[in-house]
Image (spheres, coloured by chain):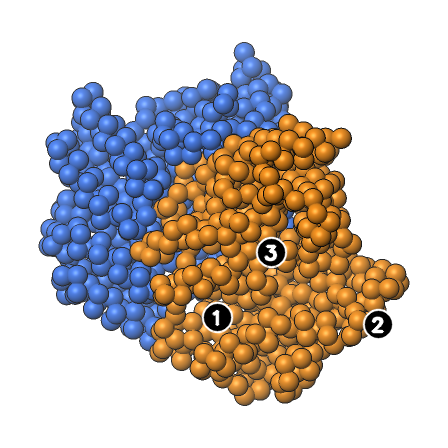
Chain colours: A blue, B orange
């Protein structure tokens, strides 16, 4: 078999950096997803772009699938080895290659995590702003075009990756982008590769844009009586051009779960959590103006967290909301789904989704990055109930279709993986065929994460 | 001949919207470029995406080249019909399709110009920020990934186009992007097409991000003794995180030309022109902090333009600098070239370029969008002197190579066209071959603006 032949050919090259131990295979056959475990046939641990290139050349020769692997935090089954093959784990390529203070950029290996990177940057006064909550690897975040709480201010991975080193399906090592902040020199290969989920190339280095640590930060929570009132406050804030660094929505069920998990005592109604970055006076002005808007929308008085400790606690609660929600139904597992709609349709999209969830009988808190029009439902199911799984999948499908009918997208930040593949044609129409043409041109043997994102027989 | 056959086949479809008049052909065989006129064999004026699709299908059948044409303001010979064929002029697809106030987006036809769009938006309190100076068409700006004076704050066309309708080389009409602000649903076709200079598809509609008109605006000029001092002020401002809306550099020769042309009396030394957008207090604070930085770098006192009329006059001078510079050597023509380097190398890049220009004996003022590390040299030559043309081209080549050696790009915003094609391999290496693979996959008969951006026989 071709995969076996590839494994045999890889052995002399990699020695113990090729693993076929059962525990390794199992660990790489799963991620934070509801899909069943589908292990690869081997796991490789490259140390350099040259390693990656050598491995890819061998795999290409033997038509052996290769699936990039970072921190295993993806949600849609991106890393499952549905056609077998090898997982390429980038844990040994997790270094900071070079910090360029003056240019406010950094070059890193794909395996470094978001938190580790920001730890390394601490002394520089700079930080990397993209924050999906999970401590994902930077390579994985680029591959899924991740974003998160701060995208409303700093953009997504699309906006914060300015260059890549990538190994293509034939083993060529390609550099995209330059050290300059912008360029008009040809096709934007960086943007094409960001979000391609390892189907067009394997990222071996990234150049990232950094931000200066803001002089002033203020964070706050605000309770609302209704979803509409909370969303109205968001849309008014955007219309006024107030530069929020984060603006998160939690529905009443999410707040209840956070209360129980973090021993907090927020009123159990829809909430916004906001943060402002800027100069001290700038932040004070933004906070004041936002306070007025929230008040006009019927929001409660603000609970401001001005010191770093309180802010950290607040955002930890937000980041742990997923675990809090999971714990709110003991023994449950979660199908986490995300959609993104135009801001003008956000209130209706959230309301319709909540009505739909209520009618389904499943517990499914809603929360999200509403400044982008992006929200998640965490569908809590009994893992032994085929019925609940079916109901959850139908809910998730209706969320995707609803987003499309409102001019939105089937996923704002989680990516396609296996979970959203079935809706790609609905979202993109002929554009999905164009993606397939690009895939066939750049990976003619379909060895890079096959079966994900595109269909190759279009 | 195949082009003749295509013209014959197009005639019944288009009637008088197909022109082969000599004046039309000549008008579409040139742009604001130093290249010689190379007219197409016909000019078509489509009115809809369906028109474009029908035309492309006929041209595909007859292997007839098609070159998109907007306002003719491109600088690198993008629109020249080097393999013959038809120019597709989008003047009749210049409408505003829909303004979405609440989402702060607008859908437009490709032929609308930047100024016409902002005129249409005037009543909404919104504006489209990308400003390359020239009154280019929006479709052309997307095709060349244009940017300009405001990119330091609002980004380039890459950041401000959120969706496209495109006709592919086989006539398929494809929509990229959605109405949502972000998406992780597959390959970023929008970003791939922006900057592809009409070689992958013809843009028939664009969805653009808009910005709210800032409450407060302040603009100013500041004189410096040396280039280094001016650039030092720029890099310090960036490091401090002060959000400039524009920050432009003009060298002494540019200022002298502006003085002569606009009857102004700026001291004839290197200058920065800056603008701040925000709340009234925010702008005041930014302006004050920038003033301190400029003073520390040895800048003069500021000349602030706080009312709209003075500001308009100031930026008109900047936008007319090209004409002012052209007029500074009567009878000359200009080779305009642009490069972009990492901010950390900006001072050296500008200084080395100026030394090189001085040694060459050609008059060649330097100016640019220094907040991005992007600058232009306007090389003034006697159009009848082959010698001067050669010297200018050599200077331009050394600028491109210097930018590459400093980690930059051969063009920050003008694009590749014919002028920068020769350096694409140096900038991208194997990445240029990847671009060629994509081109061959999406335009197998090489009918879309052939001979530009990529090489198809890679």
| Chain under callout 2 | B
At x 71%, y 66%, the residue is B377
In the figure, A397 relative to B130: above or below? above
Q: Secondary structure at mark 1?
A: strand
The furthest residue to the top:
A1
For the residues marked 1 and 3, what is the alpha-carbon distance in whole angstroms? 29 Å
Disc 2 with disc 1 on a shared chain: yes
Give the quadrant of residue A99.
Answer: bottom right
Disc 1 with disc 3 on a shared chain: yes
In the shown orientation, is residue A104 left or right of residue B427?
Answer: left
Crowding at label 2, few (<14), some or many (≥20) Cα neighbours within 10 Å?
A: few
Give the quadrant of residue B60.
Answer: top right
Q: Secondary structure at mark 3?
A: loop
Q: Give residue B71's mark.
A: 3
**The N terminus of chain B lies in quadrant:** top right
For the residues marked 2 and 1, what is the alpha-carbon distance in whole angstroms? 35 Å
Q: Give residue B361's mark.
A: 2
Depth check: B110 or B185 in front?
B110
Identify the residue under disc 1.
Answer: B244
Residue B311 coordinates in the image, percent (x, y)? 50, 78
In the shown orientation, is residue A428 left or right of residue B204?
Answer: left
At x 41%, y 62%, the residue is B121
Residue A39 coordinates in the image, percent (x, y)? 41, 22
For the residues marked 2 and 3, what is the alpha-carbon distance in whole angstroms? 33 Å
Regarding residue A255, the answer to whether it shows in the image is no
Camera-side mark, 1 or 3: 3
Camera-side mark, 2 or 3: 3
| Chain under callout 1 | B
Ranked by sequence position, the earlier of labels 2 and 3 is 3
At x 61%, y 61%, the residue is B342
């Amino acid at each position: 078999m071709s995969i076996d032949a590839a494994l045999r050919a890889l052995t002399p090259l990699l020695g113990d950096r090729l693993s076929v131990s059962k525990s390794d295979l199992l660990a790489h056959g799963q991620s934070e997803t509801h899909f069943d475990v589908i292990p690869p046939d081997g796991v490789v641990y490259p140390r350099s772009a040259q390693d990656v290139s050598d491995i890819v050349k061998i795999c290409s020769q033997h038509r052996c699938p290769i699936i990039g692997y970072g921190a295993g935090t993806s949600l849609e089954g991106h890393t499952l080895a549905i056609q077998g093959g090898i997982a390429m784990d980038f844990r040994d390529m997790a270094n900071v290659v070079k910090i360029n203070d003056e240019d406010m950029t950094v070059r890193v290996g794909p395996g470094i995590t978001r938190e580790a990177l920001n730890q390394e940057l601490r002394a520089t006064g700079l930080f990397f702003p993209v924050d999906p909550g999970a401590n994902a690897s930077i390579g994985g975040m680029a591959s899924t075009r991740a974003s998160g709480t701060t995208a409303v201010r700093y953009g997504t991975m699309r906006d914060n990756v300015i260059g890549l080193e990538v190994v293509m399906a034939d083993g060529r090592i390609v550099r995209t982008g330059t050290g300059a902040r912008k360029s008009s020199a040809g096709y934007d290969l960086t943007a094409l590769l960001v979000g391609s989920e390892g189907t067009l190339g394997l990222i071996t280095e990234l150049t990232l844009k950094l931000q200066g640590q803001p002089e002033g930060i203020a964070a706050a929570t605000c309770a609302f009586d209704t979803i509409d009132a909370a969303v109205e406050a968001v849309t008014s804030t955007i219309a006024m051009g107030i530069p929020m660094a984060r603006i998160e929505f939690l529905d009443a069920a999410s707040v209840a779960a956070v209360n129980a998990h973090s021993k907090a005592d927020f009123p159990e109604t829809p909430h916004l959590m906001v943060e402002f970055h800027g100069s001290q006076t700038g932040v004070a002005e933004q906070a004041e103006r936002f306070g007025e808007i929230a008040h006009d929308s019927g929001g409660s008085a603000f609970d401001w967290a001005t010191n770093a400790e309180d802010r950290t606690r607040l955002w930890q609660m937000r980041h742990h909301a997923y675990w809090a929600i999971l714990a709110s139904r003991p023994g449950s597992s979660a199908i986490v789904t995300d959609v993104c709609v135009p801001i003008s349709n956000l209130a209706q999209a959230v309301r319709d989704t909540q009505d739909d969830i209520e009618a389904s009988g499943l517990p499914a808190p809603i929360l999200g990055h509403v400044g982008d029009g992006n929200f998640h439902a965490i569908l809590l199911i009994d893992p032994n109930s085929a019925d609940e799984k079916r109901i959850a999948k139908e809910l998730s499908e209706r969320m995707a279709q609803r987003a499309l009918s409102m001019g939105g997208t089937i996923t704002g930040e989680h990516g396609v993986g296996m979970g959203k593949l079935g809706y790609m044609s609905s979202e993109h129409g002929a554009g999905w065929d164009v993606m397939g043409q690009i895939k066939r041109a750049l990976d003619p043997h379909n060895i890079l994460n096959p079966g994900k994102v595109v269909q190759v027989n279009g």
